[in-house]
Image: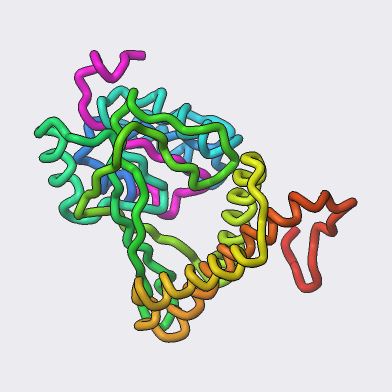
């Protein structure tokens, strides 16, 4: 594989997939401004892999079993041949203006090795009132200048020298499919964050659990404007506040011991 310095490719997109057929076409279509699109598929069973095989063009796909998100990103970026990589999830798509902004930035010898990309998080279409809120993550990265620490944390950030820049245009993220999906993701994210901080020998405290969960609610409900969206906005803000609390609850439990066993199903759970 050619390295970024001699491949002749300036910008790669890198996409992770797992049973993502429902959103993948829109995602890939929106990334046409990139010189290549590298996709790593976690052995999908819904037709995602077959679709990728038929896609052709700029898309290069390979399969890899997900172990941690950090190692998955390293493997994905190792396949990218560009000098820069834009990391995109399969449930995201580039909003108008992002491609033009990135291409202009990369033509001007960028000052930073990493850039925050805004994310417009949109909620289910079947909810009575459309709900959205903005966040950002470091997604535009200069390959060879960034790395990821070994971690089980889903949102482990890229490590680089100096400060990160910030783009004006961004990505649309189809965040949650339902209230159940929203809550299940918060538990999953909280568990991965707790394992990460436990590995760093961090300890939970009642004060941090209270202040961080309260701060998260204020941040999303008031500062990011979820109060504008009625019950939907309150539901999302409360779930994100719960995520902050649950992370400390899981961290506290990891420091307390391990349960002898845990029942697979809870009352009313019909999943096989």
Image quadrant where residue 139 sits: top left
In the image, is residue 23 part of the stretch drawn in magenta? yes
Query: Which residue shows up at 75% across the image and 50% down it?
Result: 255
Q: Which part of the image, by quadrant, shows the C terminus?
A: bottom right
Query: Which residue shows up at 36% across the image and 33% down it?
Result: 160
Q: How many marks?
A: 0
Image quadrant where residue 35 sits: top left
In percent of width and height, residue 188 lies at 61, 55
Query: Which residue shows up at 42% across the image and 76% down it?
Result: 221
In percent of width and height, residue 28 lies at 32, 44
Coloring scheme of the render? rainbow
Question: Going by the picture, which residue comes out furthest to the right?
Answer: 260
37 relative to 116, above or below: above
In the image, is residue 214 part of the stretch drawn in magenta? no
230 relative to 247, above or below: below
- Residue 246 appears in the figure: yes
In percent of width and height, residue 6 lies at 24, 13
Along the line of sight, which residue is nearer the eye, 126 or 263? 263
In percent of width and height, residue 159 lies at 41, 35
- Residue 12 appears in the figure: no
Along the line of sight, which residue is nearer the eye, 242 or 103? 242
Q: Which part of the image, by quadrant, shows the N terminus?
A: top left
Query: Which residue shows up at 44% across the image and 61% down it?
Result: 175
Question: Going by the picture, which residue comes out furthest to the bottom?
Answer: 230
**Bounds of the magenta segment:** 1-26
In the rendered structure, the answer to whether residue 243 lies left or right of residue 140 reads right
Along the line of sight, which residue is nearer the eye, 52 or 121? 121
């Amino acid at each position: 594989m050619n390295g970024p310095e001699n491949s002749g490719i300036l910008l790669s997109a890198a996409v992770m997939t797992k049973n993502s057929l429902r959103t993948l076409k829109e995602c890939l279509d929106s990334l046409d401004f990139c010189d290549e699109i590298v996709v790593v598929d976690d052995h999908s069973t819904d037709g995602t892999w077959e679709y990728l095989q038929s896609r052709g063009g700029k898309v290069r796909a390979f399969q890899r079993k997900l172990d941690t998100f950090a190692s998955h990103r390293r493997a994905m970026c190792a396949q990218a041949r560009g000098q820069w990589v834009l990391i995109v999830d399969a449930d995201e798509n580039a909003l108008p203006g992002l491609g033009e902004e990135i291409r202009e930035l990369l033509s001007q010898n960028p000052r930073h090795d990493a850039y925050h990309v805004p994310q417009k998080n949109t909620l289910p279409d079947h909810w009575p009132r459309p709900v959205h809120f903005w966040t950002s993550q470091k997604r535009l990265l200069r390959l060879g200048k960034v790395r990821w620490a070994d971690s089980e944390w889903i949102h482990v950030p890229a490590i680089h020298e100096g400060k990160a820049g910030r783009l004006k245009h961004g990505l649309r993220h189809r965040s949650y499919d339902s209230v159940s999906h929203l809550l299940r993701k918060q538990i999953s994210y909280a568990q991965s964050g707790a394992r990460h901080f436990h590995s760093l020998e961090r300890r939970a405290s009642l004060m941090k659990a209270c202040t961080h969960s309260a701060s998260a609610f204020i941040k999303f409900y008031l500062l990011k404007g979820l109060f504008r969206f009625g019950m939907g906005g309150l539901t999302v803000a409360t779930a994100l506040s719960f995520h902050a609390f649950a992370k400390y609850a899981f961290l506290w439990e990891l420091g307390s011991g391990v349960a002898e066993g845990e029942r697979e199903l809870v009352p009313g759970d019909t999943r096989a």
